[in-house]
Amino acid sequence: MRFRECFEFLSGRRTHGFVITSAGNCSEMWWEVTHETEGVFYLEASMSLASMFGAGLALGVPQIPVWVFTGDGAFCMNPGMLMVERQLNPPNLKHFLVSNRCYGSTYEVRLPNAPANDYAAMARAMGIERVYHFDSLEDLKGNFDAAVLGPGHSFVVLEVEPVGKKLKEPPIEGPEMKYLFGRSVERAAGVRIFDE
């Protein structure tokens, strides 16, 4: 499926909650489609820890949905994230693995073993119970409610075409991102993150 169309659909179905995006195409495409600064953390500096950040957040605010978008390039740097996700198993965590079979942060250099990598099988092998794989927008639309709105932690593989060009990075620097996101968590969850 086309990357942009996939993210347009997903952003249109998101009604509330938090979004964490990994470096590269995930952050850049979410920014291009939404221009959101509230409730979104563009984790541009860490290519393999977005789901760990999201899992910790999900545990801290169990009443709020947390969507994490990880590119398969980032995933390949830390597939052990699946073991941690399975052990923590936060029911409000929805982990989308965006598979375009290349490293989006490095101008779409092909991943090793790209055609054979089966991310859904890897998640199942780690014991994750709710695993979904979509390679068409129609299939994603038809099964969105079960995969994303259903109860429990989900791991959702989205097979998308490479973007074919370098996208613009979100124009938000680290310290600004920290405070924008932290303040949005404070407001939405009624918790205190920062001192006066």
Image (spheres, grey):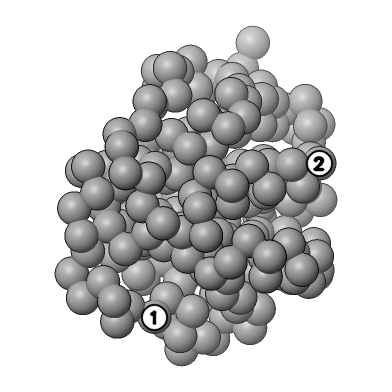
Q: Position of residue 50 (x, y in %)?
A: 45, 49
The kind of residue on which mark 2 rests is: Thr
User: Which type of secondary structure does the marked residue at label 1 adopt?
Assistant: loop
The residue beneath circle 1 is 118
Front residue of this view, candidates 86 and 142: 142
Image location (x, y in percent) of residue 72: 36, 61
167 lies left or right of 26: left
Tell me where residue 186 sits by quadrant. top right
Residue 21 position in % (x across, y down):
49, 43
The amino acid beneath tag 1 is Asp
- Name the foreground residue: 69 vs 174: 69
Please give the name of the residue rendered at 27% of the width and 57% of the height, measured from the top-left corner.
102
Query: Which of the 4 quarters of the picture holds residue 8?
Result: top right
Q: Quadrant of the C terminus?
A: top right
- Determine crowd level at label 1: few under 14, some 14-19, many 20+ residues with C-alpha closer than 10 A: few
Q: List the residue tagged with mark 2.
A: 15
- Image point (50%, 22%), residue name: 177
Q: What whole-number distance in Å separates the C-alpha atoms at marks 1 and 2?
A: 30 Å
Residue at x 65% of width, y 78% of height: 130
Residue 123 visible in the snapshot: no
Q: Is residue 187 visible?
A: yes
Taking 146 as reference, is 97 left or right?
A: left
Q: Nearer the viewer, residue 169 or 191?
A: 169
Q: Residues within 10 Å of mark 2 (few under 14, many from 20)?
A: few
- What secondary structure is found at the residue carrying circle 2? loop
x, y percentage for residue 142?
Answer: 76, 68
